[in-house]
Amino acid sequence: MEEEKIYGLGARVQGGTIAAPVLPYQPPEPRDRSVPIGLIGCGGISQVHLRAYAAAGLNVVALASRDRERAEARRAEFFPGAAVVTHYRELLSRSDIQVVDIATSPEVRAPLIETALLAGKHVLSQKPFVLDLIEGLRLVELAESRGLQLAVNQNGRWAPHFAYLLEGVRAGLVGRVSSVEMAVHWDHHWIVGTAFEHCPHLILADFGIHWFDMAVALFSSNEPLSVYAVEARSTSQRAQPPFLAHATIEWEHGQATLQFNADCTIGPEDRTAVIGSKGALRSVGPSLTEQHVTYTTSAGAASPALAGSWFLEGFQGTMLELLCAIEEERAPRNSARENLRSLRLSFAAVQSAESGVPIKL
């Protein structure tokens, strides 16, 4: 039809099926997996950390938690030979521990990171690693001044679908990225009755940090110019913080749009589209762990068969990348300095949602 030609609705891929590019999307491989690791904080997310580390053959030698019973349960399930202590300073005093994974709640992370760095430990921190950018920069500079690595558990970067998209962009498969569109529709009501209900900007400031981080990574070294964000309550949500949010981020030669609906109890969907000058990478599925990726160019389309999941390889990737960085004496891809760029964007989105106006960066 003539209207299809005018609006490009009749456009089709020129070729047929092409071979999927082979990309190094899986977690990196350190030479030494026996590096002694200590974990501080044995709450709910620690179970995911420890399961991933055990499957990767890593060496967790100590667990610190004020709740000894919970820490002992984690030890029995994943690392029976690990020590259990009830104060983090006991863990940090051990000379054998080289890396500390801090998996506590965000309001206490910064002083724990500082104490661990002063004790001479490399650190992997849960996200967000700080709640203030100035504090974050201070910790980054402290780590650098002491020759230590400070990394952030942005595990989404090693979720198989996101990792493939990132590697595709790094390899130049889509050319220059012009737009990134991400939409997540899921049920987040598990937070009802938990401490997460007291986070007024839960979706943008906590859950959404993965997607702000991916937007920053996909646009590579380009810096965002501004962000405009809106939050709203769903008519059927049961949780206290707004479950609807979206953000539009402007770059000099592109834009990213992020859409969240945490009240999707029926028909969940998670989709991402990365559009560039040479092609497109897309991923779609009903959840974070079930995704189908396609790569499209003028020559045709490919669908790589990806192995792994967010809640195993994703959590392995952050620690394995840190271990590789320590071995190779380089900054990890998930360094805290790099993560400050993502936090700046997330914090600005919250500021925009509160003020109702775009925030220039």
Image (spheres, rainbow, N blue to C red):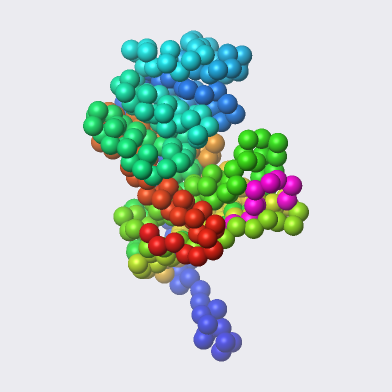
> Is residue 93 visible in this depiction of the protein?
yes
Q: Residue at x 31, y 55 (%)?
A: 221
Q: Residue at x 74, y 57 (%)?
A: 235
190 relative position to 202: left or right = right
Is residue 210 covered in magenta? no
Q: Position of residue 261 (x, y in %)?
A: 64, 55
Q: Position of residue 141 (x, y in %)?
A: 28, 36
Q: Position of residue 356 (x, y in %)?
A: 54, 63
Q: Name the image quarter holding the N terminus.
A: bottom right
Q: Name the image quarter holding the C terminus.
A: bottom left
Is residue 169 shown above or below 155?
below
Q: Which residue is at the front of the view, 6 or 236?
A: 236
> Is residue 335 visible in this depiction of the protein?
no
Q: Which residue is at the front of the view, 129 or 285?
A: 129
Q: Residue at x 55, y 17 (%)?
A: 66
Q: Position of residue 217 (x, y in %)?
A: 39, 51
Q: Residue at x 52, y 14 (%)?
A: 86
357 relative position to 268: left or right = left
Is residue 137 shown above or below 46?
below
Q: Residue furthest right?
A: 236
Q: Residue furthest bottom?
A: 2
Instruction: Please provide the residue range marked out in magenta.
Output: 237-249
Quarter of the image for residue 9 reads bottom right
Q: Which residue is at the front of the view, 60 or 228?
A: 228
Total marks drawn?
Answer: 0
Is residue 246 covered in magenta? yes
Q: Which residue is at the front of the view, 341 or 59?
A: 341
